[in-house]
Image (cartoon, rainbow, N blue to C red):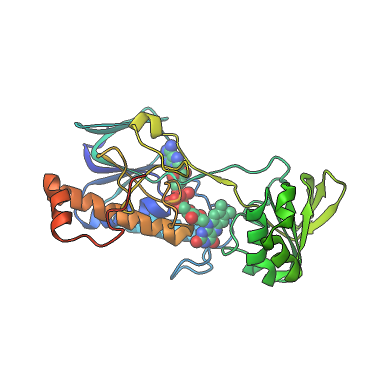
Amino acid sequence: MSPPPQDVLVIGAGAAGLTASVMLARAKLRVLVVSTPNRRNSCVESVHNVPYAEGVSPQQLYGRLEETAEEYGVTLVWDEVLQAEADASGVAVTTRGGERYTADRLLLATGPIDELPPWLPEDVWGKTAFECPFCHTHEHDGKPFASVGRGLEAIGMALMSIQYATTMTAVVSDENAAGTPMAERLRQAGGIVLVDEVAAADRDAAGALTLHTKGGHEVAAGALLIPGVKKHNLRFVPQLGLELNENGGIGTTTLGQTANPRVWCAGNGSGNGPYFMWTGAAASGINAARSICEDIAFGPLLESYWTQVKKTPGDQGQKA
Ligand SMILES: Cc1cc2nc3c(=O)[nH]c(=O)nc-3n(C[C@H](O)[C@H](O)[C@H](O)COP(=O)(O)OP(=O)(O)OC[C@H]3O[C@@H](n4cnc5c(N)ncnc54)[C@H](O)[C@@H]3O)c2cc1C
């Protein structure tokens, strides 16, 4: 039997969705979370830079969060949302399992989509290959590193991680990048800038990679950084009539409000730039939960309330 209409429906039980759902349920709202099980970092052995959870496994981290959500009465359903609708009468989602759930408000917390390069071997993403210079580089201290990308992002990531590397090679496809001050800075720090493209990669039993470039070079990559893997998740944008921001992500205020007054968006799937990494995604879930609570409590008085209390800069940031 389908659950009764909810106050808030959340798509995505990751950092943003679970964090928001606990806050909403603690505000005595009926919350239903529909999610597929794979979070962005489900592939890693341990999680880092998450307060109180340094070094725990994703299973431990999400298991504890799911327990907490359920303790507060959140209903958690494992299914994929295929269709989402939101108009003046409320919101509804339809799932792959054939269920239809309804609510007053919707929080999109689907996370981004990671598009891995075709040459990346199986089972190295999240083990020896990453997008982030903060999450797992420390665990690869003392290895040869490579950073692969089009241009400045790859050089920037190399500069951010060179302190761990025995050798650091930035492989960039844009030859203009090699002549930039950033490239010079990397060279001065002891790194190499190679204008080339990766054609293939081998891995050893421990996941250490050897990159083979189109130009015939071999580059050792005990740890590999690949900036630009993360793509905006725009799956529900047309269905919900959402607007995009200048970066091509879902346009939201800093409190996660979208162009659709029934819909909020939080986490790395939103276009909300400052909220990066796990704790950033969780923080944007907190902001969205706050905004949903305010929307419910203040109703049509929301805008005038903010005008009267002289909103602080950023609290009601721009949608675009
Ligand atoms: C390899 C790797 C390692 C990382 N390691 C760290 C780390 O150590 N520390 C750190 O701070 N950050 C780390 N990150 C970043 C961190 O994982 C993300 O910042 C965080 O998970 C983003 O949270 P989110 O809620 O936006 O998305 P997610 O946590 O990915 O959650 C989104 C959820 O929505 C679900 N979903 C998507 N579409 C649908 C749909 N249509 N229907 C139902 N459910 C759906 C997904 O399956 C998922 O469960 C890592 C990222 C990667 C890629």
Q: Quadrant of residue 152?
A: bottom right
Quarter of the image for the N terminus: give it.
Answer: top left
Q: Quadrant of residue 80?
A: top left
Q: Name the residue located 44 percent from the left edge and 34 percent from the top edge.
A: 235
Question: Which residue occupies the foreground of this view, 129 or 157?
Answer: 157
Residue 8, visible in the rendered structure? yes
Report how many numbered discs are placed on residues in the image: 0
Which residue is the extreme one toward the right? 216
Q: Name the residue located 70 percent from the left edge and 45 percent from the top edge.
A: 122
Q: Quadrant of residue 69?
A: bottom left
Is 263 left or right of 152, judged from the image as shown? Answer: left
Which residue is the extreme one toward the top? 98
Quarter of the image for the C terminus: give it.
Answer: top left
The percent coordinates of residue 258 (x first, y second) are 32, 42
Task: Answer above or below: position of 131 versus 160.
Answer: above
Is 268 left or right of 8, judged from the image as shown? Answer: right
Residue 72, visible in the rendered structure? no
